[in-house]
Image: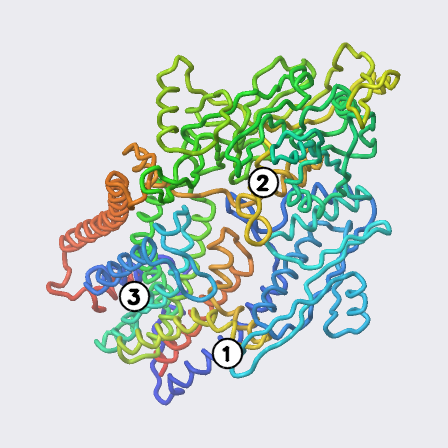
Amino acid sequence: MVDRNRDTPPQRTAGGPPTLRVAALTALLAAVLFVALARFADRHLSARTDLSEDGLSGWSATTERVLDQLDDLLSVELFITGEPEHAVAQLHRRRLLDAFDEFEDLAGPRARVVLSDPSSSYPDRLRAERLRIRPVSLQEQAGTSRVEQDVYFGAVLRYRGAEQVLPFLHPVTLEYDVASSIARLVRGRPARIGWYVGRVPVPAEDGSNDGPSTRPDQDFTLLRAHLSTRFEVVDVYGLANGVRVPADLDALCVLAPRDLGPRAAFEIEEFVRSGKGLLLLADRSRALVEARRVEAYDTGLEPLLEAWGAPSSPRVLWDRTSSYKVETRSSVGGGATAIDYPLWNYVQGAGGPPEGSRFDTESPVTARLGVLLLRWAHPLESGDVPTAVVRRTLAESSENSWVIPLQRDIRPDAATVEATTRQLIASRDPAARHDLVVTLEGRFPALDDGANGPPADDPATGEPVPGTERARRTEDAVATRVAVVGDADWARDEVVAGPEGLSIIGQNSATFLDNVVDWLVQSDELVALRARVPKDRRLVDFEARALEAAGVVEAEGPTGMTRRAEQARREAARERSLHTLYAALGSLALVGLIAALAFARRRSSTLVPNRPEGADSTRTTAHDADAAGGAR
Amino acid sequence: MTAVAKVSAVARRELGAAIDAPSAWVAAGAFAIALQGLFFFAGYPIGDLRFPGLWEGRVASLQVLFAWLPPLFAVLAPAFTMGSWAEERRAGTEELLLTWPIASWQVVLGKFLASWLLLMTAAVVGALPATLVVASLGPLDWGVAASGALGAALLGAGCVAVGLVVSAAAREQLVAFLVAALLLTGMWSIALFLRVVPGELAEWFYLVSPQAHFLDSAARGVFDTADLVYYGALVALALLVNWRMVEARRRG
């Protein structure tokens, strides 16, 4: 109903308050009210929705599942500086407090969050020091003065007398850090992971690599150190000599095993059949980069892998599409040049070419993995998988890949690479995808129809010692998980090392290892949480596409860009310009559409009778007043 | 005639006037060209949130586009609102308008809706084709795009409401434009000074800056009730001030 009194034009009176003063006063009051309202909403309204596909803002349902495992009250004590003088620290503090407000809402009565300020309270500072929560020193220019302050952003989680300390809370990793800490508290102890590294021959006195004695391969220290930050990593020795895999391990990582005896294989099989997880890097060759040659060997676990339906091939992968660029010396001129080396396989997550190597995006282990660099990878062949076991491929090569015999000479050479590729294309062997990482899940059958274990080897001579046979402990296998990778190089220090810690490729290798180990110890929630990284949203790479279409294998020669590569780059630039033009034309089309609508409106309005001729439509007229007045 | 019809009549009149005027077309065209040029090539090189242009960054994301909306709206919204009151006054039509049998709040709301619709149309003209191009070249996060669009609509509403207040207070269009643009650019640039102010003040600065309520939330796909209150309060209070000023003039 229309309030007719309100519609009546008020009587204009003289001598009212000056407009500007009224406006200024009202505006001032409104501004104060606005800031007060915004502050109130900021402090007290926490309802929010994350509409993004990645869903990275806020706590996920996975954290709720982790919280569901709590039987007692979880106490979270935040050690956060109350009044940071540094603006960025203040905003960091604000974000963390908002996040823990949401956490409290999510946890309900299961958790209690308390805030301590070590910067203003001496007892709080002492407790923070005891927990090894150290302040971060911030220095920055603030106006004319220099701000220097130590700020605390740590937390401790307590549950049933145990505690987990998070020395520095970072908003990006907050959910994973908190959820994994809760999972550890619920478990009571960190998972224990066995670490077995294959033995390599100790070089003989003459410098050859065929010495009689062996030592553990030293090339996996960086990822071992990385794993140690989250798990209790225990070295496992002497499997061939009758030492059992410790029963209190939750999972075992076997890296590049070499010529393991039947007893070692038996011990590993027994461990798996007892329901424990296994990660096996079933590499069958080792590249000696400095010597520019590669040597082949057996893992000794071939019968086991054969029985599980995932044997690793003695041959290596030649991937034409997803090869990694390596630097080589040109035979002409001797300059450094980069070529695609098909023996190095670059498995990519989202963003790679459709026909390229790929991860299983349905599995949380590899769903969000960026890359994995495999070198001289041995594909995992399709064997007869036991009925109680499910095999799943997590990574596979591109459609344009073959399996070729291992070549001793590993010098990357553009001419040889091209000749080999041509030869393979011409051969009867069709290109196909090959499995590079597989997982096996279920109850694993016993080898040799459940016969007892073979005798242990003598540590000195390596010969089997009669009478040291061992009876099976596991009559009925317990369901468990096994992951097999046909390469160990992705975990080697020379691949993962960066200038400071891990390289970008190394960080991906570390994430893959974390994911696999979490999966093996059945911490599926944590794998799911780690998979919560932004999806790869790279645009179509016009340049790569143009280079491929131009058939350019070698993008840069010793004397600079080749003509074809240059042409391909021009083509890519043209594509970019074209797409920019599409956007501009789209805008133009929309403007045209609006203009057409405006024109149509104008035409129809000129047909309205009694419209005062020559009336300026931008001004208020008596006609407008009539139109607005309508019924009146 | 109902209040809604009256508001709608004012809005239609304002829209018609804007479409008939070449200045709106020029402003919208310049906005679309600037937005796309910045988005595809220049990126966002200001403050702590720095993003490369689309072709350089090669990521299917609209972050750069969203990042440029607050400063561009700070100029475009005043361009659309500057004449709403100031031009009426200059042309002497305000007197006539105020004698209409229509309540002041209806006129204020009608003018606001018209300017807001204009601003949103300009934003769609500039952003939609760019969004479709990005989506055709990579996996665009449509959730973030939708949330960003909603956030941009709220941001635009706030800018228009502030622009109308300034237009109502100013005698000249140009003055209205300059003051409103300065005010809105000031609000946007608050986030740039966060690093050089003391921590406690930084929180207040952050609270009133559109960065906190658009770039750090809706433009990232997060829709927050606090942002709704922020923009709701900004629009409601600005329109209230506008109404008070019109009422004062009507009575004075």
Q: In the rendering, at what x and y percent does residue B69 appear?
A: 38, 60
Residue that extends furthest to the front in the rendered view of this protein: A206
The mark nearer the N terminus, 2 or 1, is 1
Marks 2/1: CA distance? 58 Å
**Is residue B45 depicted above or below B177 in this figure?**
above
* Residue picked out by circle 1: A29
Give the position of the C terminus of chain A as an image quadrant. bottom left
Q: Which residue corresponds to the image point at 48% horizontal and 42% vertical from the top-left? A: A536
Residue that extends furthest to the bottom in the rendered view of this protein: A15
**Is residue A428 depicted above or below B206 in this figure?**
above
Residue that extends furthest to the top in the rendered view of this protein: A449
* Residue picked out by circle 3: B80
Does residue B117 appear in this view?
A: no
**Is residue A616 depicted above or below B5 in this figure?**
below
**Do the residues marked 2 and 1 share a common chain?**
yes
Q: Chain of mark 2?
A: A
Marks 1/3: CA distance? 26 Å
For residue A509, which numbered disc appears in the image?
2
Q: Which residue corresponds to the image point at 65% horizontal and 48% vertical from the top-left? A: A176
Instruction: For label 1, count other residues whose C-alpha is less than 10 Å away and answer few (under 14), some (14-19) or many (20+).
Output: few
How many discs appear?
Answer: 3
In-image side of A571 versus A369 (left or right):
left
Q: Chain of mark 3?
A: B
Secondary structure of the residue carrying tag 1 is helix
Q: CB under 8 Å between callouts 1 and 3? A: no
Marks 2/3: CA distance? 54 Å
In-image side of A214 versus A628 (left or right):
right
Q: Nearer the viewer, residue A515 or A548?
A: A548
